[in-house]
Image (cartoon, grey):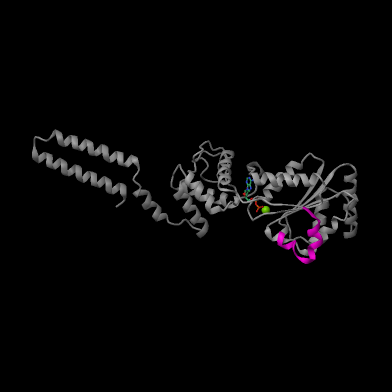
Amino acid sequence: MAIYLDFYGLARNPFNPTPDPDFLYMTHGHREALAQLTYAIQERKGFMALTAEVGTGKTTLLQALQRELDGSNTAVAYVSNSLLPFAAILEYMLEEFEIAKPGESHAQRLVTLQNFLVERFRAGQNTVLILDEAQNLYPQTLEQIRLLSNFETTKEKILQIVLVGQPELAAKLEMPELRQLAQRISMRCTIPLLSAIATRNYIRARLRMAGSTDGGLFTDAALARISEYAGGIPRVINTLCDHSLMIGYADQTRRIDREIAEEAIGYLAVGHRPRLRGRRLRARSRMTPVRWGVIGVVGGVLTGVGALVAMDAQIMSEAVRSAASYLSEMARAATGR
Ligand SMILES: Nc1ncnc2c1ncn2[C@@H]1O[C@H](COP(=O)(O)OP(=O)(O)O)[C@@H](O)[C@H]1O
Ligand SMILES: [Mg+2]
């Protein structure tokens, strides 16, 4: 739990680094990819691939996909450990599909799976295997997964297979030994990087979902800087926003401005909070309108006192001198010099 929640009026941690369907915010790109995947599954397209950069929201989107498929007669096996050999993936699938007697040998398990898929197909049900982090799957595992798709009726696929991974997955599918698999992929989609506007909306949406009622918690300049550095990657955006709130809390600052965002970037890049001294000096040197106002009022009062004692030249020069030194003292304190 983040320590800054109370200070910023938040009920929950707004920038959790783990995928959390409660914080789902559908950008145009996420919505498009989700619609494509849902359609391809419902249309029994067989193989499909989602490739996108690290941290763009693939796993989060898969959770949304599973929710979407819930209650639509679709059974889903989700495999995220892509270092498993094929035999283990098969065992895992049988368990996910709650098949009571999967068989002793590998061949028996394959037959059990095939029977299960055919039965479901006949009953008008659909079955999906999702392989997350698929860029790590060994080529021979991918090839065995392709053979699973031989379980099909003449026209329709009885198992839908969603390969999800980083751009390396697309490169892997270009390998000569995987060309049969590459050819079978009937739908490819991606999650584009968030634009500056999408990034701003994403941050504000997550803050709202966490219970914030202050729409201006991050200034526009801070949002612009975070957006620029994060390059449209939600995971980086989350980290920068979390660091910003932490730094803001440490400084007891209600607004996250560009300077704080800049420090959060430094913190992310270097691993420790940099320019702390610089920030303190800068904070003292900041001449806010309030500070100028205080100087003005004090100056006015002292001038008035000076006028009242104008009869006595000695008292007056004394008053002017002390007013001047008080003013310069104030100015020095305010500008930090
Ligand atoms: N559409 C989204 N709505 C809310 N949070 C998102 C979204 N996309 C990504 N995130 C957040 O970004 C981070 C990385 O997402 P993740 O799904 O793990 O990315 P990937 O699997 O592509 O590496 C997570 O903290 C996740 O909550
Ligand atoms: Mg992931």
| Camera-side residue of 172 and 100 | 172
- Residue 105 in view: no
Q: Residue at x 90, y 59 (%)?
A: 107
Q: Position of residue 183 (x, y in %)?
A: 80, 58
Judge from the rendering whether residue 172 lies leftward or rightward of residue 307; answer left or right: right
Q: Position of residue 24 (x, y in %)?
A: 64, 43
Q: Is residue 104 above or below residue 323?
A: below
Residue 255 lies in the magenta-colored region: no
| Camera-side residue of 245 and 73 | 73
Q: Residue at x 23, y 36 (%)?
A: 300
Q: Position of residue 25 (x, y in %)?
A: 63, 42
Q: Position of residue 311 (x, y in %)?
A: 9, 34
| Camera-side residue of 243 and 144 | 144
Q: Examine the residues drawn in magenta and state their main secondary structure.
A: helix
Judge from the rendering whether residue 298 lies leftward or rightward of residue 14; answer left or right: left
Residue 171 lies in the magenta-colored region: yes
| Camera-side residue of 100 and 229 | 229
Residue farthest to the bottom, as pictured: 176
Judge from the rendering whether residue 279 lies leftward or rightward of residue 209; answer left or right: left
Q: Is residue 9 above or below residue 271?
A: above
Q: Residue at x 82, y 58 (%)?
A: 146
| Number of marks drawn | 0
Image quadrant in which you'd find residue 184? bottom right
Image quadrant in which you'd find residue 140? bottom right
Residue farthest to the top, as pictured: 308
**Residues in magenta?**
170-186
Q: Is residue 102 above or below residue 21?
A: below
Q: Residue at x 87, y 52 (%)?
A: 113
- Residue 310 in view: yes
